[in-house]
Amino acid sequence: MTSELFDPGLQPERTELAWRRTCLSLAIGSLVAMRLLPIAFGNLGWTAPGVIGLALTGVLWIIVRRRGAAVNARLRRDGDHARLPDATLLFAFVLLVVGVGVLSLAIVGDAALRPG
């Protein structure tokens, strides 16, 4: 009896769907930021974080699609023991989230220090 660890199509598909949900969440958060930040701070320049977030989400979407296709092709060609891409994409995403968190803290801190 041969045990095959690679589940053709399903694991890469689940991973790609998870990244799609992540991109969708980032896009919605960026749209909400574009809508609420100018209202909260009274300056149209506060739409910039939302626009940047949407642009980065688009770039992330393209990278995820390409990476998913590459992983799927390697697994189909080489089987379960294929050398898969490293975690560079995940590391870049973590840096993006940390950057957004720091920016959010700066915005909240600025709002708290404003008189009135």
Image (spheres, rainbow, N blue to C red):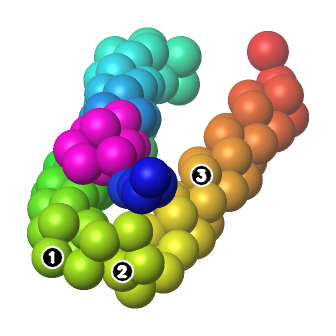
Name the N-terminal-most of marks 3 and 1: 1
Q: Toward which corner of the image does residue 56 lie, by quadrant?
A: bottom left
- Rounded to the nearest angstrom, the CA distance separating label 2 from label 1 is 8 Å
Which of the pair 59/37 is nearer the observer?
59
- Of all residues shown, which one is farthest toward the front? 1
Q: Is residue 53 visible?
A: no
Q: Is residue 84 above or below residue 43?
A: below
Q: Residue at x 16, y 55 (%)?
A: 65
Q: Secondary structure at mark 2?
A: loop
Q: Nearer the viewer, mark 3 or mark 1?
A: 1
In this figure, which residue is indicated by the disc labeled 3?
A: 97
- Rounded to the nearest angstrom, the CA distance separating label 3 from label 2 is 30 Å
In this figure, which residue is indicated by the disc labeled 2?
A: 82
Q: Are marks 3 and 2 in contact (CB under 8 Å)?
A: no
Q: Sort mark 3 into few (<14), some (14-19) or many (20+) by Cα contacts within 10 Å.
A: few
Give the amino acid type for the residue marked by disc 1 in the picture.
Arg
Q: Which stretch appears magenta?
A: 7-15
Q: Residue at x 15, y 76 (%)?
A: 77
**Is residue 95 shown left or right of residue 18?**
right
- Rounded to the nearest angstrom, the CA distance separating label 3 from label 1 is 34 Å
On whether residue 72 falls in the magenta region, the answer is: no
Q: Is residue 15 above or below residue 28?
A: below
- Magenta stretch mostly in which secondary structure? helix
Q: Are marks 2 and 1 in contact (CB under 8 Å)?
A: yes
Image disc number at residue 77: 1
Give the amino acid type for the residue marked by disc 2 in the picture.
Ala
